[in-house]
Amino acid sequence: MTLTVGSAAHRILAHRHEGTVIAAFSKAVYLDFDDAVVALVVPGVAAGPLHVQVSWLPDASGGMPAHSGVDGLRVGATAVPVPDEVWSPPELDDVRGALPLLRRLVSHRPVLDITSGDGVDVTRSLDPFLAQGDTAGACRTLFGRGGGLTPAGDDVAAGVLLIAALDDPSRLLELRAIADTAPTHTISRAFLRAAASGECIEPVHSLLKACIDDEIDNATGHLERVRGVGHTSGLDLVAGVLAALTGLSVREARLSRETSSIHVQSRP
């Protein structure tokens, strides 16, 4: 497979930074450069905006120094090769067009309350916010809830922010500010910021494109890849995507009814 460096990671590593290792796992090492996070990941981990796919991970531990710049990337005393190929999300013509097929395929209920272990119909619970265009209110109900390296609520919020960004790029500054308010840890906040910029892991973008194109076989395959991301992180994220798209649809239908009513009332 061709190894890639994600679009956001590429921008970060192009400049000189002194940073530290903030977490090290069997498949990923997370680096923090001045509150900008880069994830070194092994082959097989999906491409993504913060991901640097490497053929091997450096022997790293929390607190170890890291350095980036024109002379390359180093973790401790180890030089880490960064791929030449940059991965960027594909252009999507009309993200709202993904809703009909996505609604048929996705039924996951994220567990936001780890004490009860019960799943939540986030589409229904977030509708009062998203149908009004209140992205901040929806995210406030989600941030930090649930378990996992990235809490389930943060994953759902990432899906909400992603759709808001893809649907209306003029809101990017507003959406990034919402992500910055998340009372969560550095790694999760970094993925929220990426989503607020319209950038997410590759399987999610591929799923959206297949749904827009009404390609059920491709969409089903990409959904299976999403299912393999984390314990439930991928599915939690897509649940947020579905909730956000549903909210846009409800809002669009309401505005259409209101416009029709105004036209009827204005007739002589």
Image (cartoon, rainbow, N blue to C red):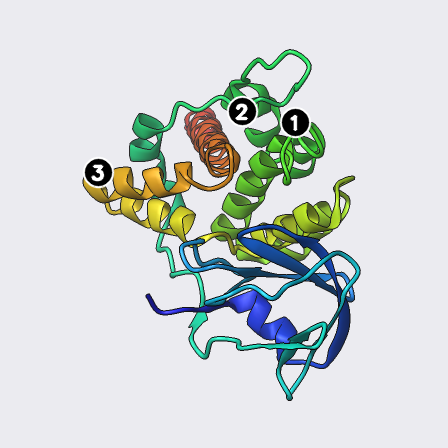
What residue lies at 52% left-to-right and 76% top-to-bottom? 82
| Left-right relation of 63 to 161 | right
Instruction: Please report contact status of discs 2 and 1: CB closer than 8 Å, yes or no.
Output: yes
The answer for how far apart the CA atoms under marks 2 and 1 are is 9 Å
Q: From this viewpoint, which residue is outermost toward the front?
A: 59
Residue 174 visible in the current orientation:
no
Residue 86 image offset from top left, x and y in percent: 45, 72
Residue 212, compared with residue 127, is above or below; it is below
Among the two numbered marks 2 and 1 on one chain, the one whose residue lies closer to the N terminus: 2
What residue lies at 39% left-to-right and 23% top-to-bottom? 107
- Image quadrant in which you'd find residue 105: top left
Residue 210 image offset from top left, x and y in percent: 28, 46
| Three-letter amino acid code of the residue under disc 1 | Gly
Residue 194 image offset from top left, x and y in percent: 59, 55
Near-viewer residue (68 or 267) = 68
Q: Label 3: state its secondary structure.
A: helix
State the quadrant of the N terminus: bottom left
Residue that label 1 marks: 146
| Three-letter amino acid code of the residue under disc 3 | Ile
Q: Which mark is residue 110?
A: 2
| Left-right relation of 13 to 88 | right
Among the two numbered marks 3 and 2 on one chain, the one whose residue lies closer to the N terminus: 2
Residue that label 3 marks: 216
Residue 197 image offset from top left, x and y in percent: 58, 57
Dot 1: within a 10 Å radius of its alpha carbon, few (fewer than 14), some, or many (20 or more) residues?
many
Residue 266, compared with residue 65, is above or below; it is above
Q: Label 2: state its secondary structure.
A: loop
The answer for how far apart the CA atoms under marks 3 and 1 are is 31 Å
What residue lies at 42% left-to-right and 75% top-to-bottom? 85
What residue lies at 46% left-to-right and 27% top-to-bottom? 250
